[in-house]
Image: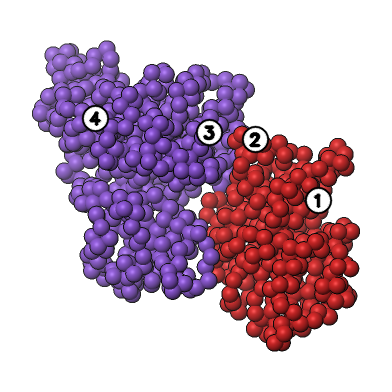
Chain colours: A purple, B red
Amino acid sequence: MSETIVYSAKKIITMNPSRPEATHVAVRDGRILGAGSLSELQTWGDVTLDNRFADKVLMPGFVEGHAHVMEGSLWRKVYCGWFDRADPDGKVWSGVKSVDAFVQRLQAAEAKLKDPAAAVSGWQLDPIYMGNTTVTRADLDRVSTTRPVGVLHASGHIMNVNTKALELAGMLKTGYNHPGIPLGTDGLPTGELKGPEVMTPVSPFVGFERNLLDADEVGLRNFAKLCVRTGTTTITDLASRMDEDTVEMMLRVTGEPQYPVRLMPFRFFIGLSARELVEAVATMKKRATDRLRLGQIKIVVDGSIQGFSARLRWPGYHNGAPNGLWYIAPEHLSELLHLALEAGLQVHTHTNGDQATQLVLEKLASALQAHPNPDHRFTLQHCQLADAAQFRLAAKLGMCVNLFANHHYYWGDEHYNLTVGPDRATRMNACRTALDSGLPMAIHSDAPITPLSPLFTAWAAVNRITVSGRVQGEEERIEVSEALYAITMGAAYTLHLDGEIGSIETGKKADFAVLEADPTACEPMELKDIPVWGTVQGGRIFPAAEL
Amino acid sequence: MGHGTGRPYFPGGRALKPVIPVAVIGGYLGAGKTTVVNHLLRNAAGRRIAILVNEFGDLPIDEDLIEAESEDIIAISGGCICCSFGSDLTAALIKLSELVPPPDHVVIEASGVAMPGTVALSISILPGFALAGVVVLADGERIQAQAEDDYIGDMILRQLSDADVIVHSKTDLQPNVGGVEAVESWLQATAPQARVVTTTQGRLPPDIILGLTGPNAKPQASPHADAGYETLTFRQIPPCVPGDLAQNLATGTYGVIRAKGFLRDSEGRSWVIQTVGRRFEIQLSQKLEPAGVVCIGRSGTLEAGALEALLGPAG
């Protein structure tokens, strides 16, 4: 018979309502045999007692329902963000607070490069926080005049490059008349490139050669390290193009004995017709393993609110900007929902604006008439501007929601002042209303858009603080217990995994977040600061310090 | 790039190297983009056209035209190809420019929710390519209802406002001629910057979509495709102010959908002029060329008399 190990802990928060707390948990074959007292667990027969977690607090491994493997890939470039952020090796990079500071950071990276032609690449620059300073190629020429230099903004939609990069791309010339290519007084591009179509000709020269939506091997490994450091044992890649090479690489890497995370990639809807997409994903689903859960679809319906590309209902944008963009035609959306329901495949839809959310609700309602499924759990991702009526309808339709709690912290002020105005900014990511509507709810980071850290995400939903320090929408705050549920069982439910993970109870995977303190005993404002020791995933132990 | 009526959209001199003209075909789902593309391929008449589509979907190309098929490229009889670009049009265009030999024309079939003007802008920054115009298709039966739809109405109007030429399609399905005329005048009033043409089953002359080859090229007309359209060539044009004349051709009431050719200014210099819809571009020619302009328009609408008054005798 397999060995049974009983771990003692300072406290075990189980998320199992029939036994919410325990002192010991028994693990056999990577699964949980039971949680309770030592004497209760000893009734299983021969057990080995392991006290390594005696001074730790165990929770179910955290589940991140909306992130991108890209987070792992980006860390090979130089971090230029405004906020302090930990890299996969645990090093905390301080936020850069001025153009000089980020130029210096790039200079330091440049000095370490041996190949004279190698590019210097940075990411996560966010001039919004620097009083909307404009960065120019002159700034980046201070890093190098002989190497190409490029820095991707936090939005992912703007890039700054130096003169050499423009020259290599054949773009150092006059005559441009394009809103995405600002010109200097000399008539030449300033090096700020706005929009993917403007960035693409230069990207390969500054180290952003790959489609960032495609996972790469190093990125996948880095991503896993970040998961261990944040207590995350199951995570999504939302979304990936999933070509054959990528799928094979993901199967190989996640199948390695020491890969510490269960990954659930969603196939991006673009590039195939509705019918081909559903067929491809259904075929892929047959190749799923425990650690690579293939077989879901992600649809992007609209853009972003701060980019003014989200689709809003009346009265639209607060600053009068025209309504945003559709990324899928309503008929195409409808066809995909019908086919996915028919094939039994799960769909998660990105909607930011409330009009986009309304379209999904309407189209799903009629698709469900044709293909009834009481347990589809199609999930509204972001769904930031939904009102109470939409949450109620979503609940009635059997949907779930995954709200972008972190966004509220990072861009809440921007929404209050500029994009949607005080009223709607206050109800953005309305966790309280969603739960009160009976809607199954998760909360997310959308890493790399914001850092991966489920405890931070819980903190954001509990406190609703914005960067400027205001509480925005205090009526929409939720309890700590509800937020902890959202980052475990809540997210597991949206992924149809609530029978396997999300709580510490008999039969589930032995997935634990190992914490240095009790998140239910601290001040709600300290939730984000609870240190994470590491994880246990499928019974395998992963100390963050030994990554 | 200017999108306003009569504004030039490629200011200044461009590189001498021949550029590949790129036509953008836009319009909502069901507007007939695929039909137009297939008709174009059937009447390519030796032109090597590369069609770029968002996704292969439910087969964008009629089966009898296909010679070979792979994951992201379809080889079409007559040396044409069709490629899917997914979400990265710029990368697909860069790849096309590396083909040996490069295609003579590129046609982008934009997705039903794309803004054709945005697609056109992204072409304008790529070396080696030049925009040949934006053609937006409108389903005659449904376009007015679509324009009032709560979800897509504003997008439909923005698509129409991006057009150089609006192709009012599928008119054979419309119940009566009065209805066709009403839709046509609605389109013209809604998108005053564009020229509106009406067609059935995608029957458009390739020149309307791809651009004219100019007065000195061998004619590539295909009688079937060109039925209902007329081409006039003018070779006795007196010296003029090329910008003014091009603007006049583009914005005047001559019924000209496209024009292309060379003009001489009062100092004897040669200028390349091109108009599409109500826009024009002019550029100083590096070579001295005889004056000559070719114009295309719908038969019965192309005002030969008024054009002769402007450009001298046709023929």
Q: Chain of mark 4?
A: A
| Of residues B246 and A399, the one drawn nearer to the viewer in this rendering | B246
Q: Are marks 2 and 3 on the same chain?
A: no
Give me the C-alpha separation between circle 4 and circle 3. 45 Å
Question: What's the amino acid at mark 3?
Answer: Trp
Residue indicated by mark 1? B198
Q: Quadrant of residue A41?
A: top left
* Relative vertical location of residue B194 with respect to residue A496 in this rendering, above or below: below
Numbered disc in front, either 1 or 3: 3
Residue indicated by mark 3? A314
* Relative vertical location of residue A503 with respect to residue B241 in this rendering, above or below: above
Name the mark on residue B149.
2
Question: What's the amino acid at mark 2?
Answer: Asp
Residue indicated by mark 4? A512
Give me the C-alpha separation between circle 1 and circle 3. 35 Å
Numbered disc in front, either 4 or 1: 1
| Of residues A399 and A508, the one drawn nearer to the viewer in this rendering | A399
Give me the C-alpha separation between circle 4 and circle 1. 66 Å
Report helix, strand or loop for mark 1.
Answer: strand
Query: Within 10 Å of the Cα at label 4, are there few (<14), some (14-19), or many (20+) other Cα atoms?
Result: many
